[in-house]
Amino acid sequence: MKEDNGSGLKEVFKSVGAAFFGVQSSKNRERDFSQGKISHFIIVGVISVALFIGGLIALVSLVLP
């Protein structure tokens, strides 16, 4: 998933993670909108949400007998 313009998979995960927690900087957001491919952000976003929900389910399963 490496793009020609330098926004690779690592940067996409960092941007999605920062946006997920609400700490995305304006500079990075503008870079994402101008250089990133929307499909990459959607895929990484869906994966991140699924991992978050899976983690919550696992945590609740550990806490509740």
Image: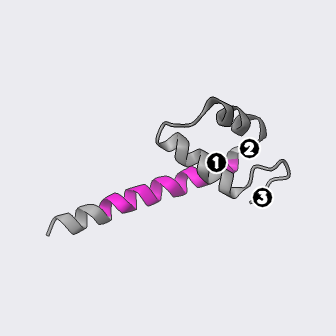
Whether tag 1 and tag 3 are in contact, CB under 8 A, the answer is no
**Could you say where residue 32 lies in the image, as x and y percent from the top left?**
70, 39
- In space, the residues marked 2 and 1 are separated at their CA atoms by 8 Å
- In space, the residues marked 2 and 3 are separated at their CA atoms by 10 Å
Quickly name the residue at label 1: 41
Q: Is residue 13 above or below residue 34?
A: below
**Could you say where residue 35 lies in the image, as x and y percent from the top left?**
78, 40
In the picture, measured across the screen, residue 7 lies left or right of residue 20, that is: right
Quickly name the residue at label 3: 2
**Segment colored magenta:** 39-57
Which amino acid type is shown beneath numbered disc 3? Lys
Does dot 3 land on a helix, a strand or a loop? loop
Q: Nearer the viewer, mark 1 or mark 3?
A: 3
Quickly name the residue at label 2: 36
**Could you say where residue 8 lies in the image, as x and y percent from the top left?**
74, 55
Whether tag 2 and tag 3 are in contact, CB under 8 A, the answer is no
Which amino acid type is shown beneath numbered disc 1? Phe
Category of crowding for the residue at label 3, using alpha-carbon neighbours closer than 10 angstroms: few (below 14), some (14–19), many (at least 20): few
- Residue 47 on the magenta segment: yes
Q: Is residue 54 above or below residue 38?
A: below
Q: Earlier in the sequence, mark 1 or mark 3?
A: 3
